[in-house]
Image (cartoon, rainbow, N blue to C red):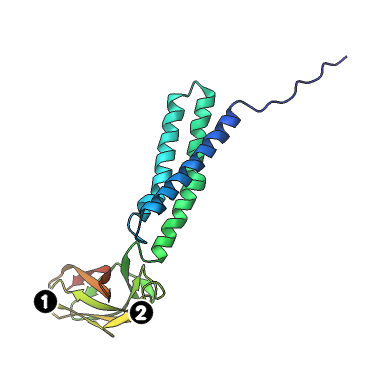
Amino acid sequence: MSVPAAPLRPRPFLPAFLLGWGLGALVLLLVRGAGLALLEGPCQGRTVLALLPPLLLGPGGLALTALNWNRPRRAALGLGLVAASLVPALAVGARDIGVLRASGCAGGYVVMSREGQPVAELVVDAGSTLDLTARVGGYSAQTHPGPFTFSSQVPAPGLSVSFGQAAAEAGQTVPLRVTVAPGTPANSYVLNVRAVQRAGQQTYEATGSLTLTVRP
C-alpha cells in the first residue's frame, strides 16, 4: 500500500518575498504621495522625488539581505524590497523623468548638425567655411511656445559665426555658418552657442558647444 504524498507547501521564503515587495510598493506610494503634496512647482524637486524610492529600496533591501543571509525569511524580505526597487519604483521613476524631460524641466540644449548628423567636433582648414544647422532640444513648442534667440561666443579673433535667422522655436533648425579666417593659428577652439527664451519673468536657456580643430 503506497503512502500518500505530503501536500505541497509554499516555500517559507515566498511569502516573505511577496511581503517585502508589497512593503516596497507601499513605500513608493507614500513617498510619491508626500512629495506631490509638498512640492509646488512643476519642476523643482521632481527628479529627486522620482529617484528617491528606488535609491531607498534597492540598497536598503540588499543590506537587509546581507545582514540576514542565514535567516531565509528575513533575507527573502530584503530581496522583495530589491525587486520592488526595480518594479514598480524604478519603472515609475523612469517614466516620471521622461515626462520631466518632455516638459523642459531637465533643461534645454542646442544641437549642431552637419548634413543632418549631430556633431560635437570638427576638423577645419584655415580660410574655409562650415555650413551647419542649430536647433533647440529639451524643450518643445507646446510646452515652451515662442522663439528662442540665438547667440554665440567666439573663442578666437579668426573665427566668426553667423545665424541664418536670429530666433526660432524649439525644434526648428536654424542655418549656422562658421568662417575660419586665413592665418588663424592651428589649435582646438570651443565654440559655444546659446539660445534664450524670455516668457514674462521666466527665462529658459539652452546651450551647446562645438570643438573646432583648425589646421593651417
Amino acid at dot 2: Thr
The crowd level at tag 1 (other Cα within 10 Å; few <14, some 14-19, many 20+) is few
Residue drawn at (82%, 16%) of the image: 3
Residue 216 picture quarter: bottom left
Q: Residue furthest right?
A: 1
- Report helix, strand or loop for mark 2: strand
Where residue 34 sits: x, y (%)?
41, 48
Q: Which kind of residue does numbered mark 1 sit on?
A: Pro
Establish if 48 lies above or below 204: above
Quarter of the rendering containing residue 56: top left
Q: Read off the residue under disc 1.
A: 157
Q: Give the CA separation, mark 1 to mark 2.
A: 26 Å
Seen in the image, is 182 located left or right of residue 137?
left
- Percent across and percent down for residue 94 are 45, 54
Q: Which residue is label 2 attached to?
A: 173
Kindly state the secondary structure of the residue where label 1 is placed. Answer: loop
Q: Closest to the observer: 195 or 127? A: 195
Answer with the quarter of the image where residue 176 lies. bottom left
41 left or right, relative to 82: left
- In this picture, is 190 found above or below 172? above
Quarter placement of the N terminus: top right
Task: Answer with mark 1 or mark 2, whichever residue precedes in sequence.
Answer: 1
Residue 83 pos. (x, y %): 51, 40
Please rate how many residues cluster around mark 2, counting C-alpha atoms within 10 Å: few if below 14, some from 14 to 19, many from 20: some
Between disc 1 and disc 2, the foreground one is 2
Is 11 on the left-hand or right-hand side of 125? right
Q: Residue at x 46, y 41 (%)?
A: 27
Residue at the location (32% across, 81% down)?
Answer: 168
Residue at (60, 25) in percent of width and height: 12
